[in-house]
Amino acid sequence: MPESLRIGVAGIGTIGGGVLKLLHENAEILEERCQRRLEVSAICDIDRARGADWSHIPWFDDAETMLREAQLDVLVELIGGSDGIAKTLSESALGARKHVVTANKALIAHHGTALTRAAEEAGVTLAFEAAVAGGIPITKALREGLVGNRIGRVYGILNGTCNYILTAMRETSREFDEVLSEAQALGFAEADPSFDVDGVDAAHKLCILASLAFGCEIDFDAVHIEGIRHISPLDIRFATELGYRIKLLGIARLTDHGVERRVHPCLVPLVNPIAHVEGVFNAVVADGDYVDTTMYEGRGAGERPTASAVVADLVDIARGRVVPPLGVPTKSLKPIPKAPMERHRGPYYIRLMVRDRPGVFAEIAAALGEAQVSMEAVIQRGRSPEEPVPLVMTTHETEEASMLAALERIQGLDTVVEPPRMIRVQTFKAPPDAAV
Ligand code: HSE
């Protein structure tokens, strides 16, 4: 039997603890599958209390010291953060020809291409299955299971916190702030929820998926990002009435103008299975030219699912199964331009709060007409000469620039009393042509 794979784990928080538990509890089956032991040779964290259960494993307070002094084949980086110690430690490990496994989406989103290049130069692997959609093996699916396909589009629910909040808002008709506070009290949302609810975490994952799907560099700055703070129970109710669910989606697509990468709330038709992925679950859909549509659903976060993904990467390394981390060597990554968001085409949901007076609708229809936006459906509920009432419309497919021009005109009308709410409708008809 080959020698053990010697693993050093940096960061013994929730995920680190889960990795240690999994490697311990499933040691036998892992050894059988790898024909090799996966041995934790060293662990490191600044908080020694976290190591209480693992006192038999050599402990280091400093990760760089662990890297220098412990005999390691692999560094598992579970410290987090796009820069600082997570980055320098990963660079040091690759420079010292150690494989690196990480769950750190921010690190890969911002430095993934450079770190992959460093791994190639050192002849080792950089693996990050746990960084995208937690326990769902989506990087492996795109890089290996779907390797024979041209991927035209990849999209999904990439943030469990947002999906939990939107689900709870729909089920209980409560406002965003109230549901967020409850999610924080229950431990489903971070004390600082901004990365989750403002769409940044989903954007980290999306730009990694786009690189794997289309063979381009990981480009976080190319992602158009909107979060869910402005979603109201009123919009969720109207969406339901129109046959949709509101979901925060990350969508990457090849278009005639380049790669579109966007994270924003969407109205998803109830006929699409992703509309029914609720609570903390994640789901990713990938369309390939031969396989057609594939969908992957599971837990996108948490100790056990994320540990499952980290260990899958360790097993690949133990088996000597090394593939290019981004699907192709970095020198073959294509410089595909970023598709500008103004060129996005699709239907839109618009909600206005208007004074209920004769002629209001005619003014709004004229503003839409002038911008070449064609209406599909209109709902007006309530009748109140004093209070503003909601006026909801969906449009036929139009270009984003036209929609924004129409909304600017509409916002200037005296009878429209609040800034218009716009949510993109995502119908996901036929998979687009995969060729670019
Ligand atoms: N906070 C993320 C989520 C998981 O809510 O899905 C880690 O990226």
Image: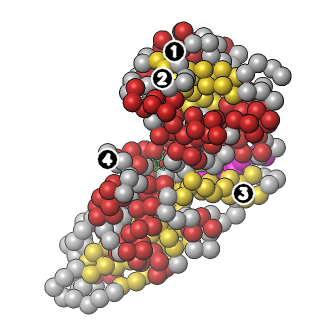
Relative to residue 295, is residue 103 drawn left or right? left
Give the foreground label among 4 and 3.
4
Q: Nearer the viewer, mark 1 or mark 4?
A: 1
Which residue is label 1 attached to?
66
Q: Mark 2 is on which residue type?
A: Cys
Give the mark nearest the N terminus, 1 or 4.
Answer: 1
Q: Which circle's residue, 1 or 2, is located before the other in the chain?
A: 2
Residue for badge 4: 191
State the CA–CA distance, disc 2 to disc 3.
39 Å
Callouts 1 and 2 close, C-beta under 8 Å:
yes
Q: Nearer the viewer, residue 186 or 170?
A: 186
Give the percent coordinates (x, y) of residue 201: 45, 44
Q: Which residue is mark 3?
A: 294
Q: Residue at x 51, y 73 (%)?
A: 244
Which of marks 3 and 4 precedes in the sequence? 4
Disc 4 residue crowd, few under 14, some 14–19, many 20+, Cα 10 Å: few
Q: Residue 44, which numbered label?
A: 2
In the rendered view, would you say 432 is above or below 238?
Answer: above
Which tag is nearer the camera, tag 2 or tag 3?
2
Q: Is residue 295 left or right of residue 418?
A: right
Give the structural element (helix, strand or loop) at label 3: strand
Residue at screen point 58% across, 47% down: 305
Main secondary structure found in the magenta portion: strand
Label 1 crowd (10 A; few <14 / some 14-19 / many >=20): many
The region drawn magenta spans 149-155
Q: CA distance from mark 1 to mark 3?
A: 42 Å
User: Element type at marker 1?
Assistant: helix
Q: How far, Cα to Cα, is label 1 from label 4?
A: 31 Å
Residue at the spot 55% in from the left edge and 50% down from the top edge: 300
